[in-house]
Amino acid sequence: MPSHKNQHFVPRCGLRPFSLLGQGRAINLFNIPSARAIQNASVRDQCAKDYLYGKDGHVEAALARLEGDYSTIIKRLSDGETLNEAALKEHPSRVTFALEAYGKLTKLTLTHEDFAEDSVVVDGISKGWPAIMCSLKSLLETGEPLLIPIEALFIAELEEVYRA
């Protein structure tokens, strides 16, 4: 039995900027089904489910490594470090997604646009979006995310692009 029973589908480092004082401990939220505001809710309990990725711990361990790298990169970027000068020179792109319920199904529309004509970023991020969005759609429709093989996210290729 893994020691990490509480498994997050949104990394806690992704919730940290929205937490109180940016400390990553508590967050104010609004519970839509009960129509009530909740003050100082524990970040630990948000966007998580017991054994979300299974009880054997393999997927959770792999994701924990990725989340650790992701957290480090986000921290470095927020501290002003740059990973790729060419990417920095590009104007920001725009991502929008819409979720529409159709009974037990979900229509998901993702638009990522306004890339520079010779973008160094577009190829790398285009490879990850389909897997991530498919998992989100599955989670919304069935309550279970898709288990995405790490190689489907092209992590090694993305590191090469952003470190170039």
Image (cartoon, helix red, strand yellow):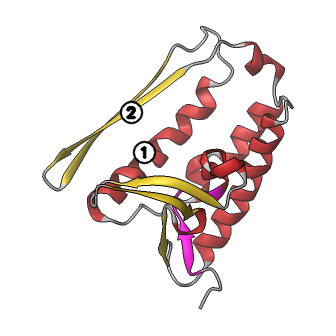
Residue 90, compared with residue 62, is above or below; it is above
Q: Answer few, some or many: residues within 10 Å of disc 1's Cα (few below 14, many 20 plus, some between 14 and 19).
A: some
Return the residue nearer the eye: 43 or 37.
37
Return the residue nearer the eye: 14 or 90.
14
Return the residue nearer the eye: 20 or 164.
20
Secondary structure category for the residue under label 2: strand
Secondary structure category for the residue under label 1: helix
Which residue extends farthest top? 117
Q: Answer few, some or many: residues within 10 Å of disc 2's Cα (few below 14, many 20 plus, some between 14 and 19).
A: few
The question of residue 155 being in magenta is answered with no
Where in the figure is residue 25, as x and y percent of width and height? 66, 61
Residue 124, compared with residue 148, is above or below; it is above
Mark 2: amino acid: Phe
Where in the figure is residue 97, as x and y percent of width and height? 39, 33
Q: Which residues are magenta?
A: 5-12
What residue did someone put label 2 on? 97
Asked whether, in this view, residue 136 is left or right of residue 150, the answer is: left
What residue did someone put label 1 on? 133
